[in-house]
Each structure stands twice: as C-alpha cells, then as structure tokens.
Amino acid sequence: MFYSALRWTEATQVSPFADVKPVRDKTAAWDKRSPYREEEVTALLEQADPRMKALLLLCAHGGLRISEALALEWNEVQLAAGELLVQSGKGGKARRVVVGKSLIQALETVRSEGAVIGGSYPAAVERLQRLCTRAGVPCRGYHALRHYAGTRLTREGASLDDVARHLGHSVLETARIYAKWSDEGLRRRMAGW
C-alpha cells in the first residue's frame, strides 16, 4: 500500500512486490468454519434468557444469518402458519422459512411490537461471547449456528434442495458443505462392510 501511495503521488514508478503471490491456504474453507455440535447448542439454550434463546433458535433452527435475525420484524412472523418471511436476506432477496415447535415456543415468550430481537450486531456478538463462556462452549460466532441448521437438516435426510431453500442459498452447490460435516449416514452405511 505504501508503494501504491507513492506511485499515486507520482513519487516513484517502482513496484517491488508486483511478482509476490500470497501463500495459498490448503485448509478447506468449510474446515475453518465448523458448526456447533448438538450438545453445544443444547448447553447454550439451557443458559440463555428468553430473548437470547429466541435469537439462538432463529439462527440454529431457522438458519437465519445474524443480520436477518436482528432485522426480523413481528409482522414478518406467522406463528400459526409455522413460518416467517425474511425480507432483508442476502442480496436483498426475500424467502419464507419454515419454523419448528421449539422456535415457535421461544418466539411466543418474547412477543412484543416492532423488531423480534433487534439490537446491534456488536451487542449480539458480545452477548453470544458471554453466553458461550457461561455455558463452557467455544464461541464460533452466529454463522456456526446457521451451519448447525444446515448440517442437522442434511443429517436428518433433507435433500440438498431443501437445505438450500431453507438457508436461502441461491446456488445448490453451496449446500453441499453441510453433507461434509454430516457424515453419520455414511458411517452407518459403511459400518457393516
């Protein structure tokens, strides 16, 4: 950046790092962002207050991104229909998300006006870090809860199309990473060989 600034000011034409290439990381991207395990999610839910429990379940069961969960408004939640509408999805795309019994119950306990959860991203991160410390769970961030949702769906036999639709992936291939984390089915099939 220093030499870029010097070239921009026309102080030099030298570009000593033009041929330098970064070392390629050989660790696959999905190995760096592993999901929370079932027992970790359970421990977090046991330690969470009602509002935090709803936020955890929006991400871990609903598969919402943290930005989607914080922006969710009550007029987008239809508990009787068992779904919610994510209007502020990635890339401005909207999607319907089917919700289960535990998420419905958690949302019913925090019902109010306006935002379902609301608040800022930094505050939500701080709350998750404190909760993880209290529960004795390594903090992997909110996106690992989303990965948990995809992995759990895959483990329970959902098709890649269903996983991609639930998580709002525009490309089906993106959902394949959850199959990598969910290899219990393959282990069961191979056990008798």
Image (tube, rainbow, N blue to C red):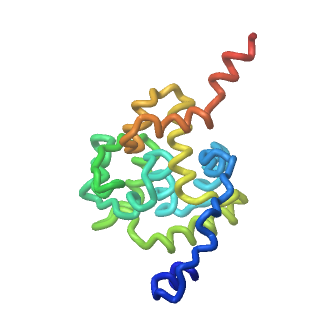
> In the figure, 111 relative to 60: above or below?
below
Residue 79 seen in render: no
- Measured from the top left, where is residue 143 in percent x and y? 53, 54
Res 135 → quadrant: bottom right
Residue depicted at 75% across the width and 10% down the height: 193
Residue depicted at 63% across the width and 59% down the height: 21
Q: Residue furthest left?
A: 75
Residue depicted at 63% across the width and 73% down the height: 16
Image quadrant in which the N terminus is located: bottom right
Apparent side of residue 12 relative to residue 87 in the rendered image (left or right)? right
- Measured from the top left, where is residue 49 in percent x and y? 54, 63
Residue depicted at 68% across the width and 20% down the height: 188
Residue 85 seen in render: yes
> In the figure, 47 relative to 145: above or below?
below
Apparent side of residue 76 relative to residue 14 in the rendered image (left or right)? left
> In the figure, 23 relative to 117: above or below?
above
Question: Which is nearer the eye, 85 or 6?
Answer: 6
- Measured from the top left, where is residue 84 in percent x and y? 31, 48
Q: Residue furthest top?
A: 193
- Total marks shown come to 0
Res 138 → quadrant: bottom right
- Measured from the top left, where is residue 15 in percent x and y? 58, 74
Q: Residue furthest front?
A: 13
Apparent side of residue 148 relative to residue 20 in the rendered image (left or right)? left
> In the figure, 150 relative to 73: above or below?
above
